[in-house]
Image (cartoon, coloured by chain):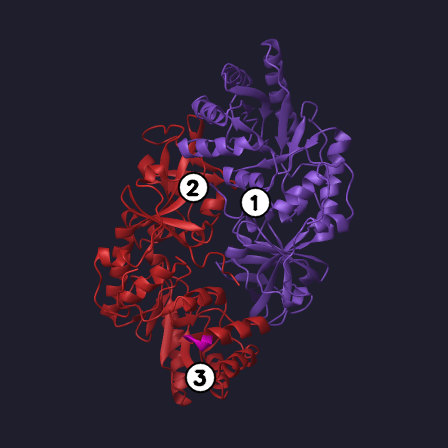
Chain colours: A red, B purple
Amino acid sequence: MAEIELKTRDFLSAAQAEALFDFEPVGASLHELETPVPIIDFDVMLANLIRWQMHCDRLGIANWPHIKTHKLVPMAKLQIALGAAGLCVQKLGEAEVMAAAGLHDMLLTFNVVGESKVRRLAAVMRNTNIAVVADNETMLAGLADAAKSAGRKLEVLVECDTGLGRNGVQTPAAALALAQAIASSSHLTFGGLMTYPPAFKRQQVASFIASAKELLQKAGVPCPRVSSGGSKDLWDDAGLADVTEYRAGTYIYNDRQMVAAKSCTFAQCAEHVLATVVSVPTAGRAIIDAGSKALTSDLGGVDGYGVVPELGFAKIYAVNEEHGYLDISAAPRRPKVGERVKIVMNHTCPVNNLFDKVVFGRGDRVLGAIKIDARGKVQ
Amino acid sequence: MAEIELKTRDFLSAAQAEALFDFEPVGASLHELETPVPIIDFDVMLANLIRWQMHCDRLGIANWPHIKTHKLVPMAKLQIALGAAGLCVQKLGEAEVMAAAGLHDMLLTFNVVGESKVRRLAAVMRNTNIAVVADNETMLAGLADAAKSAGRKLEVLVECDTGLGRNGVQTPAAALALAQAIASSSHLTFGGLMTYPPAFKRQQVASFIASAKELLQKAGVPCPRVSSGGSKDLWDDAGLADVTEYRAGTYIYNDRQMVAAKSCTFAQCAEHVLATVVSVPTAGRAIIDAGSKALTSDLGGVDGYGVVPELGFAKIYAVNEEHGYLDISAAPRRPKVGERVKIVMNHTCPVNNLFDKVVFGRGDRVLGAIKIDARGKVQ
């Protein structure tokens, strides 16, 4: 791996970026690959990374990319090299993988609950600057234990439910109360507010955050960070006045859900699943070797399980575990048994949690495969 | 591993069955496990295995269990020890794992298409008795190449589309034509008919198979095997007169889809995902640490993504990658942050493709973990 100075704000050349990856040879052409397999166009991916980093720079918002999308150490290093302030991890298992690779600035956006998790958090704290989130007082004792064990204070952001209806304190007053509980612990520091907002509801989110910030200010509690996120509406500049940092994951590869949200084009989808047509039993149906164990069953508001642009955006209308059912009734031509097709998946993140390796290429040329370091690290 | 004679028709004791597994210690109690984690009750699982084997024995149908559900070598050995005639594998990668473990009687129920797949099939043929399926003439040349390379004939069953609308020849006449094409190859032998039937349509399936058998008989083409399968209606004895062997997968663990199909009870569900409540943000909602990367997004005709029996069958009404949204509005009690819950998943098979290891236990007592040998072997 090339010695590229991390933390640089200068964008890298494609060659410099590529040098961060230690590719394993898997043949020269996409046509030689075993299918089904996830393939990533390096240049499309790099353009996506740079485009978003430039956008964050222009807004003056720190970029904290979510590594749950790619789960790759070299990609995390590339994101940092391009200017990301730190990495967002969703699970301790991901944090452990990144910590072992020498990446230290992290935000863990999932409640750490339970004794063994607390022990593992303490271990990660020893060689990283990891911050965490909390949305309830019950878990603070565990976080304090982790800090005690690690021998330093732990930074905790308060997660706010700004309308998604998932985790988070329900009101700005509850955010203040939890922030005060954190600040009153001799082992914790209050780092600010964090939310995973509902998409396309920026004003509603901004209003919650502004109210919480106002309460914190009146109470004399400093609020250094406001961390927001989400991919579908990431190009919308509205409602970000209080936001100091943004967590996006999918932007790096893009997918069909992002196209549907008008946040990218099909040409900006860097990752595909390459599959083989194994049967064309009728004029309207082809069966491919990518089913739910390659594409997942994620729908996320779109119809079907993926599309094949080169066949007139033929839709995968059903999946079983190993079979994908492709509707070729309106395709410009009938695919043949043995033909390869490139699928735009509905949702890129869970696909990278299914495969042990992912293949990078440029057009039809293969650069090589790399292990998906944090695959399956859901604990 | 205990030296248990494989291929015995005598059912084993739980202790003998357990001795087939080389468990890795992961703590004594379920309460000590990291979550989310798939857990399997050994005794419930063993009872499921024996119950189905006895049913097959009573019907005089050979049991060819689908290992795609569990992807475990010791479980495959246990199935054989209990009387299974052979193993059904869905992918070459699964066949390779089983072949490496010394399991040789296999049926690969997925079209083998493409040069590299043909090479891999030839390698598996060298130390196993693997048979395959085909539903089109295009792929026969590749199968013949594999047989040539392996130096022995390859047995090929003709896959019939008996109403599911997936792979398969469309008519009994087409089944005959493909069988004749197979039989006319000096490298292939026609092994019989295979179908993955639509559930609860046994007469329609039987009628297709009977017609195809009649055509084969008239043409003087022997049809030694008729392989059917499917889990949802596996206890239905109807329409199996021509069936010589049955492929079931889910019966070993069962799941919510099987309960919905009235093919098992919740008490017969051997596998659960153990999760931790990480937030109870409102009176009606708890958030658990099992989302689509632990449970999948598979719906399969049921509502929601899983249920928690101990909380009045509270439903997981939504999932994100790492979050499960549990509706506790009608639960008999409000779960606490840190509490463990056991989830009955919608579909057990893809869950075992997400985790590197699965934990076996008896009630709350842990027996140990084992690696999921064929996880991710989708190629």
Tag shown at residue A189:
3
Residue A359 versus residue A69 in the image, above or below: above
Where is mark 2, residue-wise?
A36
- Estimate the x, y position of residue A122 in percent, counting from the top left: 50, 76
Kindly identify the residue that appears in the image at 51 percent across and 22 percent down: B170
Is residue A286 shown to the viewer in this render?
no
Q: Nearer the viewer, residue B337 or B219?
A: B219
> Is the residue at mark 1 from the same chain as the one at mark 2?
no
Q: Which residues are magenta?
A: A125-130
On the image, which quarter does residue B37 sit in? bottom right
Disc 1 is placed on an element classified as loop
Q: Amino acid at mark 2?
A: Pro
- Estimate the x, y position of residue A235 in percent, counting from the top left: 29, 61
Q: Nearer the viewer, mark 3 or mark 1?
A: 3
- Estimate the x, y position of residue B175 in percent, counting from the top left: 54, 19
Disc 2 is placed on an element classified as loop
